[in-house]
Amino acid sequence: MLEEELARCGINICRLCETHKETSGQLQIKAHIIFSENPDSSRHGVALALPLQQNNYVIGYEPVNDRIFRVKLKASPVNLNIVQVYTPTSLASDEIIAYFYTLEATTEKIPNRVL
């Protein structure tokens, strides 16, 4: 179903939230590869869908937690970093909101000269 919607809408790179997947890593579905992270449970979860032919441009990916991860792509003139974030609502517990602020540590790892 995801593959058909991506094709119908002409979407190449798709960031996904609330995936509820119970596994992490890479999954190939037809013409796309899905990078996902959800190490602890089937709650929350973030993912990124890329066309299969762009998999050769993936330099690496860094799972941060079940709400944040980063994919680094080889690009020109500079490499591209995509940070996928599932943001908690204002009704979330203070613990969840504090957990979310690991986003700052993630973005600080990206050099200023890199997108």
Image (spheres, rainbow, N blue to C red):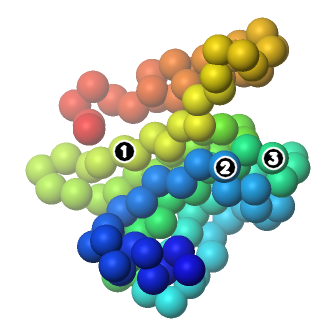
Q: Position of residue 53 (x, y in %)?
A: 35, 82
Quick check: 35 above or below 17? below
Is 78 on the left-hand or right-hand side of 10? left
Q: Position of residue 81 (x, y in %)?
A: 37, 45
Are circles 3 and 1 on residues that touch, CB within 8 Å? Answer: no
Q: Position of residue 109 (x, y in %)?
A: 46, 28
| Residue named by callout 3 | 43
Confirm whether residue 54 shows in the render. no
Is 46 on the left-hand or right-hand side of 77? right
| Residue named by callout 2 | 18
Label 2 or label 1, whichever lies nearer to me, is 2
| Residue named by callout 1 | 81
Task: Give the image quarter of residue 99.
Answer: top right
The kind of residue tagged 2 is Glu
Q: Callout 1: 10 Å neighbours few (<14), some, many (20+)?
A: many
Front in this rendered view, residue 102 or 91: 91
The kind of residue tagged 3 is Arg
Q: Residue at x 27, y 25 (%)?
A: 112
What element does badge 2 sit on? loop
